[in-house]
Image (cartoon, rainbow, N blue to C red):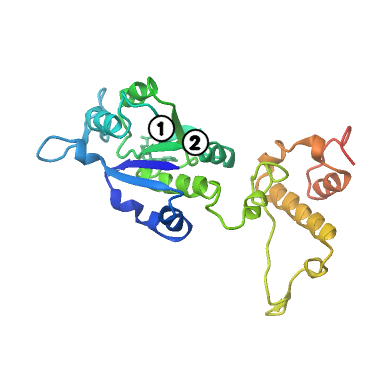
Amino acid sequence: MKLDIVSIFPEYFAPLEVSLLGKARRTGLLDVRVHDLRRWTHDRHNTVDDTPYGGGPGMVMKPEPWGEALDAIAPPSGGAVPRLVVPTPSGRPFTQVMAAEFAAEPWLLFACGRYEGIDRRVYDEAAARMPVTEVSLGDFVLAGGEVAVLVMIEAVSRLVPGVLGNTDSVTDDSFAPGAMESLLEGPVFTKPPLWRDRPVPEILLSGNHGAIARWRRDQALRRTARYRPDLLARLDRAALDKHDLATLADAGFPVDGEDMAD
Ligand code: SAM
């Protein structure tokens, strides 16, 4: 998978050398290129921002360097086009489903905004020749898009086949498509079985895989009810069995049980 990143702070992306992503780069699974936007400026001060039309505080990123950057990285006459991903608090929320969609793309181009964001015409011009997705990491405002891009690249890359050693860990994750799609993963434990007078739940030591799976699902349902009740509304009701319904009712979220699977 090809990943291009444009930023005025290329040094922000040093973490992409580390751990799983660093290894995936070295083995060629990920081809990451970080570009300094100022390379496409032509004045003595390498200016990338200017005052906003209409007045108001802050500065706006100028369209010219961005236009040149996008043309150089994805030439208008070239064949393949990347998906342009622009982090912005006013974008669509980033989710595991979106991460999986991005992981299936051959080429992503990330544009890191700073100041009050990038001149709107850059998006519109790019959209005429490549898909553009504006993505928000959440209901808060960061100082720039770099951290948001690091987050997205980490979430996307671990879904690229071959990047993770054990692909099962992805299917068991919170939000993973399938049984976990609208659920948070429950607690996890490792050795020793007793630590500071705190035992590991007996069931996990039983070797009874069916009972362990049931316990894990109950924990996921309870944790979701506690921290993310909004997700429960999205649960596939047809996939809830009687035990699920009892667990949810016990957690304070009774679900209408008509037509539910056993
Ligand atoms: N004036 C903008 C607004 O209110 O929507 C905020 C600009 S913010 C200070 C500067 C940059 O940080 C944005 O252009 C974007 O790249 C990034 N950013 C800030 N918050 C973000 C979020 N929640 N998700 C994704 N990117 C964000």
Q: Quadrant of residue 110?
A: top left
Ligand 1 within 8 Å of the CB at mark 1: no
Q: Amino acid at mark 1?
A: Pro
Where's residue 130, x and y in %?
40, 25
Q: Which mark is residue 147?
A: none
Q: Amino acid at mark 2?
A: Glu
In the displayed structure, 94 sits above or below 12; it is: above
Secondary-structure class at tag 2: loop
Instruction: Please report the residue visible at 46 percent of the width from the left and 61 percent of the height from the top.
Output: 19
- Answer left or right for 102 relative to 181: left
Q: Nearer the viewer, residue 240 or 254?
A: 240
Q: Which residue is mark 1?
A: 82
- Crowding around mark 2 (Cα neighbors within 10 Å: few <14, some 14 to 19, many 20+) is some
Instruction: Please report the residue visible at 64 percent of the width from the left and 45 percent of the height from the top.
Output: 175
Q: Nearer the viewer, residue 245 or 253?
A: 245
Q: Which residue is mark 2?
A: 105
Q: Nearer the viewer, residue 66 or 34?
A: 34
Ligand 1 image position (quadrant): top left
In the displayed structure, 71 sits above or below 169; it is: above
Where's residue 162, x and y in %?
54, 51
- Answer left or right for 103 relative to 32: right
Secondary-structure class at tag 1: loop
- Crowding around mark 1 (Cα neighbors within 10 Å: few <14, some 14 to 19, many 20+) is many
- Answer left or right for 236 relative to 111: right
Where's residue 51, x and y in %?
22, 30
Q: Is residue 62 visible?
A: no
Asked whether disc 1 touches disc 2, contact meaning CB atoms under 8 Å apart, the reply is yes
Tag 2 or tag 1, which sits nearer the N-term? 1
Q: Which residue is outermost to the top?
A: 128
Q: Quadrant of residue 114?
A: top left
Instruction: Please report the residue visible at 82 percent of the width from the left and 41 percent of the height from the top.
Output: 240
